[in-house]
Amino acid sequence: MSTQDSPPAGHIRSFVLRQGRVSVAQQRHYDEGMPRWSIPYAPHPIDLAATFGREAPKILEIGFGMGETTATIAAAHPENDYLGIEVHTPGVGALLKQIAQGELGNVRLIQHDAVEVVSHMIAPGALAGIHVFFPDPWPKKRHHKRRLIQPAFVHLLSQRLAPGGYFHCATDWEEYAQQMLEVLSGEALLENTAPGFAPRPEYRPLTKFEQRGLRLGHGVWDVVFRRR
Ligand SMILES: C[S@@+](CC[C@H](N)C(=O)[O-])C[C@H]1O[C@@H](n2cnc3c(N)ncnc32)[C@H](O)[C@@H]1O
């Protein structure tokens, strides 16, 4: 790891990089798609309008996993631009495949730690929305410090929203859902759009994993706040 890539002092990573198998198709789309659709990490703010080649609402997604939700939302909302962040190479390859196959011109991605990307690359007030869907729950108490939704990072993210911009988290882990509600409620820049947990906004598709969980009686909680 070079010095430039080192996390800031006190910064605890919210992920552990697994090697993970990259399929032949994912590798091909990775090799072809990265130069076209990804933005290299650099520790200074980027001009999002120039990146996407237009003025349109910019929505940031942190930890897009295999990118199914990202691709579904981007295809259904061509009027918005979506910037996805993910560290896991098979997932990046999988989203690049969907971008190519769906001809999704409104998606860009950055393969890097989202905490550093948001700290250094996203200007204050630049975003119309933020999606954090099913972040790693880090269930063991001694790992809770690795969770993404914590006061300091939520404050940083809230500053990146334009007034009226939304902050949407979802989880199937009840105790983390409670933490999300508490942390976002404690952020002075934000106000809740619902009396507590929010109904699932129609733009967020049900994933297969979530459908299975719901059939088994497991819950899913959405938390949707807005910047004042
Ligand atoms: C449990 S998965 C959920 C993926 C996807 N959002 C979904 O709903 O299926 C969480 C993802 O967040 C990614 N992740 C965790 N911390 C991250 C960080 N700091 N920066 C970028 N990606 C991160 C992980 O690599 C993982 O793919």
Image (cartoon, grey):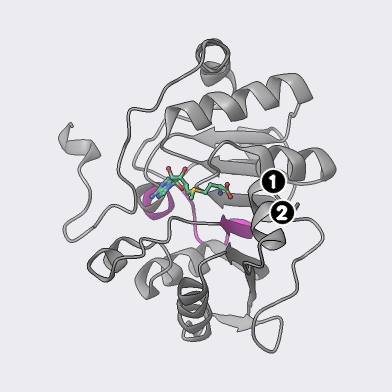
Foreground residue among 15 and 51: 15
Q: Residue at x 21, y 53 (%)?
A: 8
The reply to whether the C-beta atoms of the residues labelled 1 and 2 are less than 8 Å apart is yes
Q: Is 203 located above or below residue 99 in the figure?
A: below
Q: Residue at x 63, y 49 (%)?
A: 209
Magenta region: 117-133
Residue 55 in sight:
no
Q: Residue at x 71, y 84 (%)?
A: 194
Q: Residue furthest bottom?
A: 195
- The residues tagged by marks 1 and 2 sit, at their Cα atoms, a distance apart of 5 Å
Q: Is residue 177 magenta?
A: no
Q: What residue sits right under mark 1 in the picture?
A: 208
Residue 132 in picture, x, y percent from top left? 55, 57
- Quarter of the image where the N terminus is located: top left
Crowd tier of the residue under label 2, counting other residues whose Cα lies within 10 Å: few below 14, some 14–19, many 20 or above:
few
Q: Is 102 located above or below residue 7 in the figure?
A: above
Q: Residue at x 52, y 62 (%)?
A: 160
Residue 35 in picture, x, y percent from top left? 52, 17
Where residue 211 is drawn, which disc sits there? 2
Residue 216 in picture, x, y percent from top left? 66, 61
